[in-house]
Amino acid sequence: MFQNKKRILNIALLVIAAAVAVHLYVKYRVVPEIAFSNMKLATPEGQVVDWKSYQGKTIFLNFWGTWCPDCIREMPSIIELKEQLKNDDVVFVFVSDDSPEKINRFRERKGYDLNYLIYQGNGLKELGINTYPTTYVIRPNGEIAFSKIGSAEWNSPSMANRIRSLK
């Protein structure tokens, strides 16, 4: 009888562990679906940005934080990708929920010429962004072409060609 209880307890613990593992995987490694057109965004200077102004363009959308080492590590490769695509109709957007002051200090310190925007909600977690960086590449028709959780080296010619092909 004791062996049966022990076996049942072990099975229950395995089921719980599996459920926790699936929950953590989904929360931190699955890119959430976001209604981008409903996002309220503003520049660090407070100017409201209408998502519709990006309609018809390919969008490289990166959710990041000034405090995030992986975000900062990938930025030079994104800047190189941006340079490779400068003659294409691609918009690079960097969305954070950091304060305008933090973003401006970051911009001054790093000198990166990027389109920094601030999410005007209750934090990026309400969008389902739990891992930084999280990047979406969005087709001109608004459909997500591909996405990536975590940092990447974005500056390869094959990535530039992949993004160019999304027209």
Image (cartoon, rainbow, N blue to C red):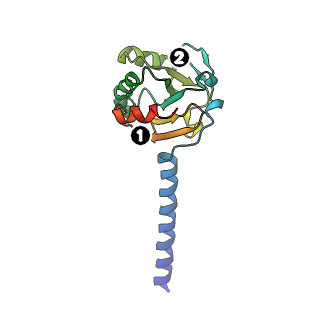
Residue 127 placement: quadrant: top right
- Above or below — where is 147 with respect to 100? below
- Find residue 116 and report its horizontal and vertical position in percent: 49, 21
Q: For the residue labelled by badge 2, is the local secondary structure a helix, a strand or a loop?
A: loop
Amino acid type of the residue that numbered disc 1 sits on in the rendered structure: Gly
Give the residue at the far bottom of this rendering.
Answer: 1
The structure residue drawn at horizontal position 48% and vertical position 67%, both measured from the top left corner, is 13
Amino acid type of the residue that numbered disc 2 sits on in the rendered structure: Pro
The structure residue drawn at horizontal position 51% and vertical position 18%, both measured from the top left corner, is 100
Q: CA distance from mark 2 to mark 1?
A: 24 Å
Mark 2 or mark 1, earlier in chain:
2
Comparing 144 with 150, the one in front is 144
Packing grade of label 2 (10 A; few <14, some 14-19, many >=20) is some
Residue 77 placement: quadrant: top left
On the image, numbered disc 1 is attached to which residue? Answer: 150
Comparing 112 with 7, the one in front is 112
The structure residue drawn at horizontal position 50% and vertical position 36%, both measured from the top left corner, is 136
